[in-house]
Image (cartoon, coloured by chain):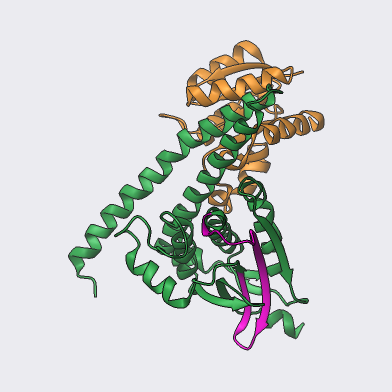
Amino acid sequence: MQSTEDKLVLGAFDQLFMSLAEGLKSPMLRIARQAELLAMNSDGAPLQQLRGMQMHADASLRLLDGYLLSLHLARDPQAAFATQPVSVGAVLYETQAALMSVARDYGVEVQIDIGGRYEPVVANARALTAALISLGYSVIEALPALGTGQQQLRLSAHRTKAGIVTGMYFDAEQLTPESLRRGKRLAGHTRQPFVNELPGSAAGVFIADAILNAMQAQLRVGRHRKLPGFAVTLLSSQQLQLV
Amino acid sequence: MANILLIEPDRQLASTYAHALTQAAHTVQVSATAQDAIQSADETQPDLVLLELQLVAHGGVEFLYEFRSYADWQNIPVVILSYVPPGEFHKSASTLTKQLGVSAYCYKPRTSLKKLLQTVEGVLQVA
C-alpha cells in the first residue's frame, strides 16, 4: 500500500512526465510536418523515407497523446466516466485506419473480424480508441521481430457471457496471461518488460492498460479463433437493448 | 489564392505551414504574438486567420475577442490550428463557433499539411 509520501513522489514524477510528454509533441510535430513538406516536393528516391519519417513522427504523437490521456483520466474520474453507447465495430474500423500506414511499413496486415452485429457498448469512445491504437503500435512493431510466418494483426469483437470482448490477436504463442502480469511488474524496471513476447519497452501496452484502468476496464491476454492476443471486455448498453 | 494571417509562436512550425500555404498559391503573413497579429491584420487585411490558441502573454481566445471587436474583421473566417485538444472546449464549443466565428478546429498533432490545406480551401469557399 502506498504511503502518503510515495503518493506525493509519484505525483511529482507524473507532473514531470506530463510536462515532458507535452514538450515532446513540439519536436515530433516539426519533424512530421517538415517531412511531409519535403515529401510533397519530392518525386525522387527520398520520397519513401520522407513518408516514413512523417508516419513514425505521427505515431509518436499518438503515443504521447495516449499517455497524456491516461494521466488525465486517472486524475479526472468524471472524464473517465463520460461514457456513451459506442459501436465496437466503428471503434475497430477507426483503429484499423489509424494503424494502416504504420502496419504497411512493418509489412503487417491489419484485419477486422467482427463476428456478427452487437449492441453498442458503454465506454468512453475516445479513450477506448486511443487505448487500442496505442496497443496496436506496440504489437505491429513486435510482429516482424517475432520471426513467425504470419504478419497479421486481427482486430476482433465477439460476445461472451461477460460482455463484448474487443481485442487484437496475433501469432505469438508465447503470449499468456502470465506474460502480461510479469510485463506489468517489470514495466519501468527493465528496458524490455515482455522479454519473450514483445521487443522494446512495449509502451503502447502500458498506455492502453492505464487508459482502460481509468475506465474501470481491464486489459488481459486471451485467445480468439486459436490466436492469443490482448483484449478488454466491455458491457453492452442495456438501455438501448430495451428500446 | 488568399491572404492568410498565420498566428503561430513556433518559428519552425510557422515556416513549414507558411511554405505549404505559399505552395498552394496563398500569401502568408506570420505573427508570433496576439499583439503583432492585430497590427498585421490592420496592415494586410487577411482573408482568413489561422490561429494557435497557446500564445505567450495574451491567449488565442483573448485575441479572438479583440479581433472580433473590430467591425471590419467580424466576417473574416478563423481556423484554429492548435495543440489544445478540441475536447477541452466541449463546454464552450458554441462560444467558439457562434460568438467568435471559428469556422474550423484543427488539432495540430492530427492535422497533416494536406488536411490543413483542404480545410483552408473549404473554409475559403464557404466564406
Q: Is residue B37 above or below residue A196?
A: above
Which image quadrant: the N terminus of chain A?
A: bottom left
Give residue A52's position: percent from left, percent from top.
60, 37
Whole-percent x, y for residue B126 in the image: 81, 33
Point out residue B33 in the picture as x, y percentages from the top left corner. Answer: 48, 23
Q: Colour of chain B?
A: orange
Q: Which one is in front, B78 or A54?
A: A54
Report the residue at 50% width, 50% height from top.
A63
| Residue drawn at the location 55% of the way across and 77% of the way down | A222
Residue A142 visible in the snapshot = yes
Question: Taking B101 as reference, is A65 left or right?
Answer: left
Asked if B78 appears above or below B95 in the picture, the reply is above
Q: Main secondary structure of the magenta part?
A: strand
- Part of the protein shown in magenta: A145-167
Q: Quadrant of residue A226?
A: bottom right
A31 lies above or below A19: above
Q: Which chain is green?
A: A
Which quadrant is the C terminus of chain A positioned in? bottom right
Q: Is residue B68 visible?
A: no
Measuring from the top left, give residue B84's x and y in whole percent: 52, 43
